[in-house]
Image: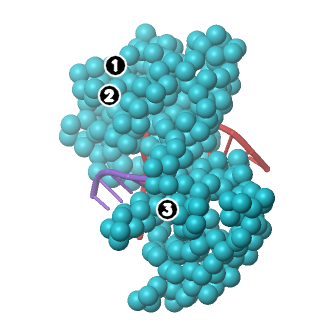
Chain colours: A cyan, B purple, C red
DNA sequence: AATCCGGGGAC
DNA sequence: GTCCCAGGATT
């Protein structure tokens, strides 16, 4: 399909370039398959600079397959706090437990076994097999598709599954004998450092001479990628409920369900605002508390919590891949005699009254961390 | 094939 | 503001 000369040139030049120019990254300092695995999961949709501190902390806290297998899930989630895509953490621990039980703690080295692990797809399987075990398997991610689409002038939409399959076939053919790990990492390194999305640095590229995309003046137009749909807007009311009496100095948090968005993460109670539109919100004193009280009161009543008066505290925003949250945070109290210490009616088990110090024990999405930190900071300044 | 699932850095 | 990143699971 593509000329043997163009392919051989690419493989040889890229491999030698990588060995001379590779960055000194934490997970490149060992061939520990467990550490390689952790790094690959963390690096999914996440930049190297973001991952580095998380990787150090995670490996330090869970140094072996056995240690992670035996850890409480809450601690694993807390170690992942802020990284996003939290199912990665839960799938990783689930898969690590399987490796501990089924393979005696040794990460398997066959395609079938690695691919079968939870959270390990075509890319990650290839990455673990090639980097940790030097097996000649392709590891095709966004970087690799960008590099290959430019060098070989491939105009297929990289969002299509069929294109990834095509790229995997090509990438596998390019792997030099006995150098799968270095070559695959070189492909990604080139994409990260030279063949970058916006303005590729062709003049420093080790394979520019035979790059078809460059020759055609197409390097900036590739890869072809269908645009994603914009996230749908959602307006929400958030309740920052301050404890009274025996709970003075604490705020009320709750844990999300085990499935879906931000699964098992902790958060402040919140409710969808009726009419997700952008109706005239912020005045100088903030939005009207009345509709917020109505929505939050109904929401909290379902958990047996009564809501006292609200006053506006701050706005907040958060964008997921598919949802854009516009939040208005209100301060209030739980106006509910049944929750006094002497009452027999307990707080539902997925709720907690916590102090600022106890925040450290719970994993929060970043948007709620920001709100809580702003709150505790302001309260400290006021006292 | 389309949708769900976070967060942040570069521009 | 826009893009997109060392993707995978689910439907």
Please give the name of the residue rendered at 52% of the width and 81% of the height, measured from the top-left corner. Answer: A311
Q: Is residue A92 visible?
A: yes
Please give the name of the residue rendered at 63% of the width and 78% of the height, measured from the top-left corner. Answer: A308
Position of residue A325 relative to residue A121, above or below, is below
Q: Is residue A251 visible?
A: no
Q: In the rendered image, which quarter is residue A333 located in? A: bottom right
Position of residue A92 relative to residue A253, above or below, is above
Judge depth for marks 3 and 1 and give the one in front. Answer: 3
Q: Label 2, on which residue?
A: A25
Q: Are marks 1 and 2 in contact (CB under 8 Å)?
A: yes
Please give the name of the residue rendered at 46% of the width and 64% of the height, measured from the top-left corner. Answer: A371
Judge depth for marks 2 and 3 and give the one in front. Answer: 3
Q: Label 1, on which residue?
A: A29
Chain letter belonging to callout 1:
A
Q: Label 3, on which residue?
A: A249
Dot 1 alpha-carbon crowd within 10 angstroms: few under 14, some 14 to 19, many 20 or more = few
First in sequence: mark 2 vs mark 3: 2
Depth check: A202 or A308 in front?
A: A308
Mark 1 and mark 2: span between their CA atoms?
Answer: 7 Å
Depth check: A150 or A337 in front?
A: A337
């Amino acid at each position: 399909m593509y000329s043997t000369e163009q392919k051989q040139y690419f493989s040889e030049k890229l491999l030698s370039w990588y060995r001379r120019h590779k960055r000194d990254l934490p997970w490149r300092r060992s061939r520990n398959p467990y550490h390689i695995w952790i790094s690959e999961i963390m690096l999914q949709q996440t930049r190297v600079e973001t991952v580095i501190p998380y990787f150090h902390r995670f490996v330090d806290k869970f140094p072996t397959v056995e240690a992670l297998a035996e850890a409480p899930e809450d601690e694993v989630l807390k170690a992942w706090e802020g990284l996003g895509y939290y199912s990665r953490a839960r799938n990783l621990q689930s898969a690590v437990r399987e490796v501990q039980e089924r393979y005696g703690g040794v990460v398997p080295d066959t395609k079938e076994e690695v691919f079968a692990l939870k959270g390990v797809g075509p890319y990650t399987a290839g990455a673990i097999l090639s980097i940790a075990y030097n097996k000649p398997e392709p590891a095709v991610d966004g970087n690799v598709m960008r590099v290959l689409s430019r060098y070989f002038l491939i105009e297929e939409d990289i969002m299509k599954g069929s294109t990834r399959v095509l790229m995997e076939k090509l990438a596998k053919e390019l792997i030099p004998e006995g150098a799968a790990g270095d070559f695959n990492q070189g492909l990604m390194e080139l994409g990260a450092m030279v063949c970058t999305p916006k303005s590729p640095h062709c003049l420093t590229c080790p394979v520019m001479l035979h790059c078809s995309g460059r020759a055609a003046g197409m390097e900036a137009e590739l890869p072809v990628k269908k645009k994603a749909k914009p996230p749908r807007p959602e307006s929400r009311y958030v309740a920052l409920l301050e404890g009274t009496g025996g709970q003075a100095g604490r705020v009320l948090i709750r844990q999300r369900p085990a499935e879906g968005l931000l699964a098992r993460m902790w958060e402040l109670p919140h409710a969808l605002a009726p009419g997700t539109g952008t109706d005239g919100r912020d005045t100088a004193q903030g939005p009207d508390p009345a509709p917020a009280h109505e929505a939050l009161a109904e929401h909290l009543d379902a958990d047996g919590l009564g809501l006292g008066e609200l006053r506006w505290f701050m706005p907040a925003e958060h964008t997921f891949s598919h949802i854009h949250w516009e939040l208005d945070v209100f301060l209030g109290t739980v106006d509910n005699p049944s929750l006094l210490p002497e009452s027999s009616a307990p707080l539902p088990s997925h709720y907690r009254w916590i102090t600022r110090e106890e925040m450290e024990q719970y994993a929060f999405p970043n948007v709620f961390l920001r709100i809580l930190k702003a709150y505790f900071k302001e309260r400290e300044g006021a006292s």
